[in-house]
């Protein structure tokens, strides 16, 4: 029998873990801010939203600049004065990875905006995503989000990267907020039809070029499909695993399984 209450407790960081992580993150932010006066350094991602899983400490930090000119290079210069090793990751806008205090940290240069229409890059609206999730969740709902994240991780459906094409953390946060609980999401998922629309505000349709297997209108930027990365294969897998959990819930479905190297080599 699956005890969701107990499972949520197992996935939720302890107060000590929260306090220790907060102390480390504050130290890192202070170090960066000291070297970078022209940007405001803030946290982002699941850490800032309060939806991170116990013992999973990947941290997103954003450097908010007032103008877009040369911000990746400006950030890199400051980071190299702060950390021993800085890895530059190339993308639509270059960002950086560092390791500090036993933490893996991604540091992203963004524009400081309040209107999503002013965004030049999807990362520019990340802090607005944080605000939406924090405003529309309480502690109970954030724990429901943790259930969803762990389940999707265990089922290899978590991540919007091109080699996964699944559900991003933000998409799962939106879905749990929309349906009101993890199990309500599972109940709805098994009946999803390809091309279904989910919207928070007024009903709108996307430009056909932006439509996908699931059309989840981003409440922060309504002409954006937050679930655009979801492939047809992962969409079908999600429906199948949701039905399996709905019909026979078990803790094993939340457990991440690894493949031994010997089996991979074989």
Image: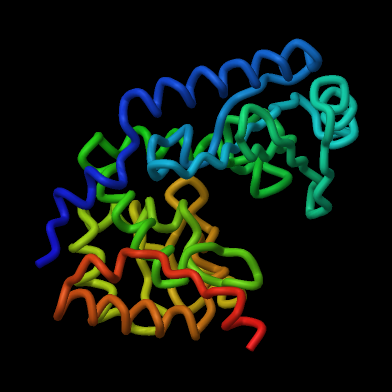
Extreme residue in the front direction: 262
* Quarter of the figure with residue 127: top right
**Could one spot residue 207 in this view of the protein?**
no
Q: Is 43 situated left or right of 31 in this image?
A: left
The number of callouts visible is 0
Q: Residue at x 48, y 54 (%)?
A: 222
Q: Nearer the viewer, residue 77 or 39?
A: 77
Q: Nearer the viewer, residue 117 or 122?
A: 122
Q: Position of residue 77 (x, y in %)?
A: 90, 27
* Quarter of the figure with residue 33: top right
Q: Position of residue 145 (x, y in %)?
A: 32, 50
Extreme residue in the left direction: 1
**Could one spot residue 218 in this view of the protein?**
yes
Q: Position of residue 3 (x, y in %)?
A: 12, 57
Extreme residue in the bottom direction: 266
Q: Is 196 situated left or right of 230 in this image?
A: left
The N terminus sits in image quarter: bottom left
Question: Vertical placement of 64 versus 206: above or below?
Answer: above
Q: Position of residue 43 (x, y in %)?
A: 56, 29
Q: Residue at x 31, y 79 (%)?
A: 241
């Amino acid at each position: 029998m699956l005890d969701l209450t107990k499972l949520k407790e197992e996935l939720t960081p302890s107060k000590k873990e929260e306090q220790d992580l907060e102390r480390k993150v504050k130290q890192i932010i202070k170090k960066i801010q000291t070297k970078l006066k022209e940007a405001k350094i803030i946290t982002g991602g699941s850490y800032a939203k309060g939806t991170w899983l116990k013992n999973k400490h990947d941290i997103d930090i954003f450097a908010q600049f007032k103008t877009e000119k040369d911000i990746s290079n400006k950030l890199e210069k400051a980071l190299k004065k702060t950390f021993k090793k800085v890895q530059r990751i190339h993308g639509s806008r270059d960002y950086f990875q560092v390791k500090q205090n036993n933490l893996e940290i991604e540091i992203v240069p963004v524009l400081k905006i309040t209107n999503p229409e002013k965004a030049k890059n999807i990362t520019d609206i990340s802090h607005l995503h944080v605000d939406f999730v924090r405003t529309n969740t309480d502690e109970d709902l954030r724990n429901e989000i943790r259930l969803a994240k762990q389940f999707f991780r265990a089922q290899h459906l978590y991540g919007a990267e091109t080699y996964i094409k699944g559900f991003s953390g933000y998409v799962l946060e939106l879905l749990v907020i929309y349906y009101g609980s993890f199990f309500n999401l599972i109940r709805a998922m098994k009946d999803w039809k390809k091309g279904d629309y989910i919207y928070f505000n007024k009903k709108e349709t996307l430009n056909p070029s932006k439509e996908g297997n699931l059309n989840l209108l981003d409440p922060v930027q309504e002409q954006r499909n937050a679930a655009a990365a979801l492939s047809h294969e992962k969409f079908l897998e999600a429906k199948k695993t949701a039905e399996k959990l709905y019909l026979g819930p078990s803790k094993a479905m939340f457990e991440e399984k690894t493949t031994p190297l010997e089996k991979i080599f074989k």
